[in-house]
Image (cartoon, coloured by chain):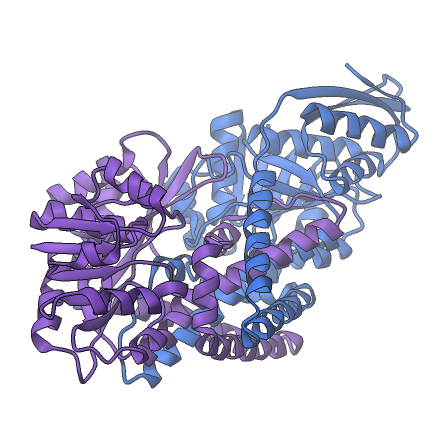
Chain colours: A blue, B purple
Amino acid sequence: MRIAVIGVGLIGGSIALAARSRLGASVAGFDSDPQALAQAIERGVVDTRCENVEQAVADAEAVFVATPVGVLPEAVAAVLKAAPDSAVVTDVGSTKRTIVAQQDDPRFVGGHPLAGAETAGVRYARADLFAGATWYLTPTAITSGVLYERLYRLLHSLGARPAAIEPDVHDAILASVSHLPHVLANVLVSQAASQLAAGGQRLPAAGPSFRDATRVAGAPSTIWTDIYVSNSDALITAIDDTVIGLQRTRAALAKADRAWIQDWNEQAAADRRRLLEADLAGAELFELRASVPNRPGVIAQLALELGRAGVNIADMALYPAPDMSEGVVALWISGSDAAARAQQLVDGLGFPVARA
Amino acid sequence: MRIAVIGVGLIGGSIALAARSRLGASVAGFDSDPQALAQAIERGVVDTRCENVEQAVADAEAVFVATPVGVLPEAVAAVLKAAPDSAVVTDVGSTKRTIVAQQDDPRFVGGHPLAGAETAGVRYARADLFAGATWYLTPTAITSGVLYERLYRLLHSLGARPAAIEPDVHDAILASVSHLPHVLANVLVSQAASQLAAGGQRLPAAGPSFRDATRVAGAPSTIWTDIYVSNSDALITAIDDTVIGLQRTRAALAKADRAWIQDWNEQAAADRRRLLEADLAGAELFELRASVPNRPGVIAQLALELGRAGVNIADMALYPAPDMSEGVVALWISGSDAAARAQQLVDGLGFPVARA
């Protein structure tokens, strides 16, 4: 398989390494920063050093645009202009509404792997970065089903768990589970630091709860300023919710309302357990086979319908009919209940479906 | 040395174990919960099982009152009434103003070890719980110097780092670095859980930043309801500061003020570095983050490699990946040269490592 990676930092470099070691793919790389590109060659991250985007994507079957969020629009546009008709093009940006709204090309599928680190740069790239990680994909009604399936299977081969999601839902969830925790970490450290200064330089011994809560404080500005700005409305909503939550707690504290505080605390314990359990899949796999017409958007419709219901597609495959008028989609679903639910949902979309 | 422990839970039990193993002390124990006391005896945590407070403290040189914060006042009063004139009496409560204000006895010194866990109960007690931990002490103008010194040296012998502090400063600092992070963790999980419910049960794949930020959500209510209520005014001040901080960030986001966001983010990075450095008296602290596979012996290998080279690990934390296939080890190393050497050594073992 021939893959192109535009932007060979931590994520792009890790995609390249994973594609080469897990798939035996040949990887062409380009980066607007010559030093980063030189480092990627030196470390053997990519096979071919390209002089520009056009050269990198010339004969690619899949293109990953892994630049910072701020320059994604022009990078994706340049790639779509130069890439073959048969190539699938995706990005890895942490917010999805803007970039997806700007595209009207059936070859483009927005993407976002939930992997990464506090570190940046190709020297931290590694082939197993995506092992077990959720990799969000945002297919739309115009997305080519064939190309979506290729990307899905490719990500699956890289060890990731691809999951379809609408761009606005993605951005709202990420605001809550990633961007907001980063904001709170920043606010917490600033607060502790100014208390320290006001207290005549007394040194507090920060306990483990503080250390964990602020681990992501001051994450790299080159990446995070873009993320904050590009998702500012969803993040503002999340911040407003947090302020409401804090004010409720404040009111209970002011009244020394022990019963409320205890309920609230125990609800939090239950919520966290539930959230983290949900994060771990790992059950028996069931295969469904659905017959679908071969028109743009069908695969996206299926994937999003199941995604909305919280049904995780562990794997998928597309088998087109010889005349390409229709096809069979095989879906592997984790867990018997989820498989039954998936069957119901696919049936509800009007596609004949059966357990294989 | 003869020590009495009133309340043999996680903290009281660990004090008993440490005093016996490190000092060869004889430890008398009492707990108002007969089951907890029986368990402490069964596990060999205390030497002498006492029927009441009076019996436990009768010939003690030092008494630790390790009951929940809510019943501390009466427990300390009972101990002071029964203890010899020559005994030092201390508590381990997480807030200090109330209990200290209630005492006018030269034998009493308020105390608070910054140690503990999400777990509670004597079965998690261990002799090394306080190794390297800050142990705040709140001597007042009426505290006996001799008894204070005895307590200080005793705590030092248990492996802790005792530090004197005023009760109000203690409570304000703890509100910021412990109680507030607990409140924020609760608010974060509630918010994510209700978003989940509103979004038709879609399961978000919670990233590592969310997991770390919410690690302490829903800490044991039996302990934490008391802590929240007893420090409610300092905690309310901390919450109000957080709301102000959030609103400032919100305003910058609403204006897409990139310069402000970048300054704020970089200030947070600098503040966190400074706060964690301050945590270790003396040399500057550097944080390294290494990615390691999750297999037995890896942590030992890391620790031994650094140990052999004479590099001291001031602190460490392990953050496993969701699927447990790998993890990130954070290592705090004291001193720039030692940190550089450590980075080299970890790199030499084949683990990707970076300065955080």
Q: Is residue B322 above or below residue B79?
A: above
Locate residue B167 relative to residue A240 in the image: left or right: left
Q: How many marks?
A: 0
Locate residue A296 relative to residue B59 in the image: left or right: right
Residue A77 in sight: no
Locate residue A191 relative to residue A52 in the image: left or right: left
Locate residue B29 relative to residue A222 in the image: left or right: left
Q: Is residue B138 above or below residue A217?
A: below
Percent coordinates x, y for residue B109 in the rendering: 21, 72
Q: Work out which quarter of the rendered image holds the N terminus of chain B and state it.
A: bottom left
Percent coordinates x, y for residue A213 in the rendering: 44, 60
Q: Quadrant of residue B36?
A: top left
Percent coordinates x, y for residue B15 in the rendering: 21, 52
Q: Residue at x 36, y 76 (%)?
A: B98
Of A148 and A37, the residue lying toward us: A148
Q: Residue at x 20, y 38 (%)?
A: B44
Residue B204 in sight: yes
Percent coordinates x, y for residue A338 in the rendering: 72, 29
Q: Is residue A80 above or below residue A127?
A: below
Of B13 and A292, the residue lying toward us: B13
Q: Quadrant of residue A140?
A: top right
Q: Work out which quarter of the rendered image holds the C terminus of chain B and state it.
A: bottom left
